Image (cartoon, helix red, strand yellow):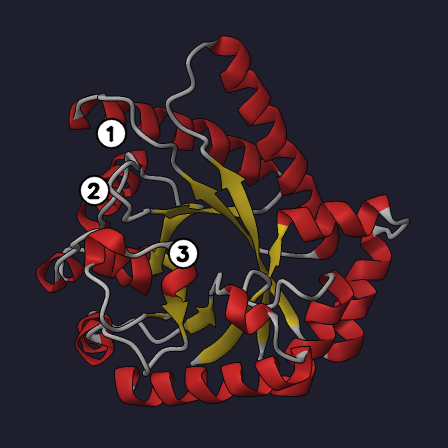
Amino acid sequence: MKLGLNGSTTDQCHLLEDIDVAKAAGFDLLELRTYKIAQYLKDGGNLEDLRQAFNAKNVAHYAINALEFFTLKKDEKEKNEMLKEAEYWCQVAQNIGCPYLVAVPARHNKESEAEIRKDAVKSLKQVGAIAEKYDVKIALEFIGFEDFSVRTLELANHIVTQVDRENVGIVVDTYHFYIGESTLASVKQVDEENIFIFHINDAEKGIIKQDLTEDHRVFPGIGAMPLTEIGQAFKSIGYQKMMSLELFNKDYWEMDKYELGKEAYKHVRDAADFMFE
């Protein structure tokens, strides 16, 4: 099991610091945030130097997060702008050798599930075709919050199955699995090879699911989520590839970056052991 750090966890860091923290803590992988890449380039950095920085630290650049709200565009102009953005991030990914681009569906606006499925399939086929030109894979992330259009593993799996492209798969995030009421039974319906990315985290104790926000993500193993059961469900279908810590907790952003990295690695390593071993 490869262990990864997502740049949202260390929001006190810029992109090159994320690489340093990941290396110092012992992580194998780093997921890059688009806003940190944009700032790095704005500050005069270039993609070849970024590739070399990863190579120097022997940390793998695993995914770019994210092509946001790529579905349910209101007109062709919005759709074309999204496809242009997808192509840009695929070009960036190719230039640094990053294999995955995460794609996040939009919030819904009273569309039916049939409309949501149809639009997501069509959009993913278009984005997947663009990504193929750059040898990049697209990872659809279902979002468990009530106002999002694709909330469950079951629906995400249905969409990806309908897309039927080798370079389009799924992001499983334990937080969204939990708050979106995805079921352990639905895991059995997923082809393990279609799980491209696995985000690990936990939910703060004492808060009902409907009141949980991104701020309530905590280190795995200290919260309220049934992580052992979730891990064992995915292990039962053969998944043991990687897990990456994705948090948005402002309290952690107040920590010293290296102490945060050290603490993060400990919790992710422990979670890998009790969830998948």
In primary-sequence order, the first of circles 3 and 1 is 1
Residue 81 - label: none
Q: Say what amino acid the circle numbered 2 marks.
A: Leu
Circles 1 and 2: CB distance less than 8 Å?
yes
Q: CA distance from mark 3 to mark 1?
A: 25 Å
One can see residue 24 in this view: yes
Q: Nearer the viewer, residue 186 or 162?
A: 186
Q: Position of residue 262 (x, y in %)?
A: 58, 87
Q: Nearer the viewer, residue 197 or 269?
A: 269
- Report the residue marked by disc 1: 117
Q: Is residue 148 left or right of residue 251?
A: left
Q: Position of residue 100 (x, y in %)?
A: 53, 53
- Report the residue marked by disc 2: 155
- Report the residue marked by disc 3: 214
The quadrant where residue 32 appears = bottom right
The mark lying in front, picked from 3 and 2, is 3
Give the residue at x 49% y 61%. 248
In primary-sequence order, the first of circles 1 and 2 is 1
Q: Is residue 99 left or right of residue 93?
A: left
Q: Say what amino acid the circle numbered 1 marks.
A: Arg
Q: CA distance from mark 3 to mark 2?
A: 22 Å
The quadrant where residue 173 appears = bottom left
Q: Is residue 150 left or right of residue 131?
A: left
- Per the image, label 1 sits on a secondary structure element best described as helix
Count how many numbered circles sit on residues in the image.
3
Circles 3 and 1: CB distance less than 8 Å?
no
Q: Quadrant of the C terminus?
A: bottom left
Give the residue at x 38% y 89%. 270
Give above or below for 255 relative to 123: below
- Per the image, label 3 sits on a secondary structure element best described as helix
